[in-house]
Structures are given as C-alpha cells and as structure tokens.
Image (tube, rainbow, N blue to C red):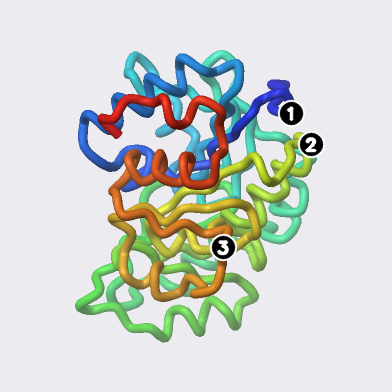
Amino acid sequence: MTDLTTREFVLATDLDGTFLGGTEEARAALYEWIDANRDSVGLVFVTGRDPEFIVDLTRGTPIPTPDYVVGDVGTTIARVVDGQVEPIAELEEEIARTWGDAGPRVRQALDGHPGLTVQDTEFRYRVSFDMDPETYDDSAALKVSEMGFDPLISANRYFDVLPRGISKGPSIRRLVSYLGVEERRVLCAGDTLNDLSMLICGLPAVAVGNSEAPLLEALPEDAPHIWRAKADGCAGIWEAIAAFGLHSQARETPNAV
C-alpha cells in the first residue's frame, strides 16, 4: 500500500473539467510538476468515472497515474497497483451493504422515465443515466429518495442513483482517515454538483474557475477552506495550492499554470 503520510501534499481531484480541464499549457505544467515531485506529492482521482476508464486514461499518456482512486461517484474506493485499480474491501464494506443488490430494482423503477436513458455500463454500487434536461421529469428524484437511495444530477446531463449517504465527500474522508493522512495536507478539487459533497466535507478545497453555476451557488459563502478559483481546470488547482501554501515548491512552478 502506497504510504501517503510521508507526502507533503495530496491532491484529491475530479477529472473532467478539473484535472483534465484548462489550457494545454496549464495541464502540461501541473502534470510535469506532479511527476517531478512524486516523493512529496500524492495523487487521488475522485471521479464519476469507472476504474476501466481511469486505467485507460493514464496508460501511455502524460497524465500522472494516481496513487488511489475514489471512483464511480464515491462508490469505489481503491488503490492503484501496477496501473490496475484494486478496490479496498474494508473501505467498500459499508457501500456494498448499503446498496445491496439494488441495481435491477432501480433500473426497473426508472425504466422509460422521461428524460432518462440508462447507461450501458454495469456499475457495482450505483446506476447512472444520461439526462435530457429538456424532457426530464423531476419526479425521478422523489421516486429514488422514496426507495431509500440518493439521486444526484450533475453537469445538467447526468442522473446518478447512489447508496444513501455515499458520495465523493464521505468516501474521500474515509480514504484519508484510513491512510492516516493529515487532513490539512489534502486539497479537494472539482467543478460540478457531483463534487459538492467533496468540496464541503471539511478538507481544503477548490472550485475551479470553470465550475458550473449550480455548484458555485450551492457552496457556503463563509467557508475559508474553500477557494473559488479564477482560473480554469489545472490552473485553478495550482491557484489553490499556492493560496493555501500546500507545498513548499508551490511558488516555483512554471508560470504556464
């Protein structure tokens, strides 16, 4: 198991629009800085994406390989070993118990619901839909809640059904505690509503400059641990690293970010 307790700084970041967002120059500068400082920088992907996507994303690309993954909107908690995502059973026990075998029941309950098209991927502990905001009927959220699950809409195009109380925020907190990492040394970064629970979970956080309006509106106004970046994507992440003083080399990073 990779020991992050010795790292000066740990970045826990969403992917689409966040770690994969910003200009090409900003992404290259941040990725290169992380790779050059892996002895003092830990990396956790906190994403709605599934493990297969994450493995393919970093294979043969300049994108740094994470040490750990909180995937599937918080329903997967895993270590990364030799490029493979390996779920941590003891951290997923509560998730699995809370979800049970709910997938078929959720799909049946929302089959044909206006504005929702179920995604083909068979996720372990969630069901995800593509959402058409023009035809979506918001009674789906009430139906999901009444079934004992949590509905989550993000980017005005995705509708996720999650185990009650499980999302990115609780799962990254669970992983940080399990690894014994000091909370003040972790930065959570995101840009959409499915990042909200992570940004308000109490760890230092940044909403990057290109964040969707509903996320920014949902963030508490008086929260000194949340940085509202002006710059987009990777540049916004760097902005927060420097603002919070999370790494001793922060101010020496190339100006490209």
Whether 95 is drawn above or below 37: the answer is below
- Give the percent coordinates (x, y) of residue 82: 56, 13
Whichever of labels 1 and 2 marks the residue nearer the N terminus, that label is 1
Q: Is residue 78 left or right of residue 188?
A: right
Query: In the rendered structure, which disc, 2 or 3, sits on the residue that comes first in sequence?
Result: 2
Residue 95 or residue 35, whichever sits in front = 35
Residue at image mark 1? 5
* Circles 1 and 3: CB atoms closer than 8 Å: no
Which residue sits at x=21%, y=37%? 23
Report, in whole angstroms, how far the alpha carbon at label 2 lies from the one at label 3: 24 Å
Which amino acid, mark 1? Thr
Residue for badge 2: 180
Dot 1: element? loop
User: Residue 243: where, in percent of width, then height?
Assistant: 47, 46
The outermost residue toward the front is 251
**In the displayed structure, would residue 154 be above or below residue 70?**
below
Viewed as shown, does residue 30 lie left or right of 2?
Answer: left
